[in-house]
Image: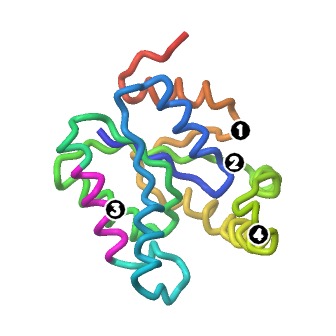
Amino acid sequence: MLVWINGAFGSGKTTLVEELRSRWPDALVFDPEMIGFVLRRIVDVPTGNFQDLTLWRRQVATMAIGLVEEYRQPVLVPMTLIDPAHVDEIFSALRESGVEVLHFFLKVPPEVLVERIDGRSFTPDDPSRDEQVRAWCKAQIPACLATAATLSQDTIFLDGELPSHKLADAVLERANKVPDP
């Protein structure tokens, strides 16, 4: 099984996956952003978004399938995916390979996302770069929120303002795992 945690930057994807991992010890965590970082070192990314690279999407699906098949453990994926065609491409490849996919989307109001993004430090040693990353994340908020309306019917929407332990309860329940008390 693969549990994809989707949502805008600042919605709490990583925090939720950390909570899930502490309560679901046999789960693996796969961050597709790492594949993007590797590709950026090798090839030019004309749009600036490595998700636009066909190779990134193919490698993400291949790695996720490999992790599920090779290790026979659940895989947790915290990753923002906002292009409906990219979502369909990756999830179709996973399902065609027989991987069960649970897709969660954390819904958070834009003003809360801005506050959370402003409270983060992405590159503490480079304040100028840190501000560029924050600005980029905030610029993605409208597209991320608009994506929610385009996601398939099997997407499970969660209130991203809930505490991470309550969100984890909901995910574990859908994954047929008994939540911790």
Q: How far apart are marks 1 and 3 (CA)?
A: 28 Å
Residue 72 at x, y percent in the picture? 21, 36
Splitting the image into 4 quarters, where does residue 91 fall?
Answer: bottom left
Mark with earlier residue (4, 2) = 2
> For the point 61% across and 25% down, which residue is it?
166
Q: Identify residue type, mark 3.
A: Val
Q: Mark 3 points at which residue?
A: 60
The tag on residue 161 is 1
Q: Is 64 colored magenta in this rendering?
A: yes
| Residues in magenta, as a range | 55-66
Q: Distance between the residues labelled 2 and 1?
A: 6 Å
Residue 98 at x, y percent in the picture? 17, 47
Mark with earlier residue (4, 3) = 3
User: Where is 19 relative to 113, above or below?
Assistant: above
Q: Identify residue type, mark 4.
A: Asp
Q: Identify residue type, mark 1.
A: Glu
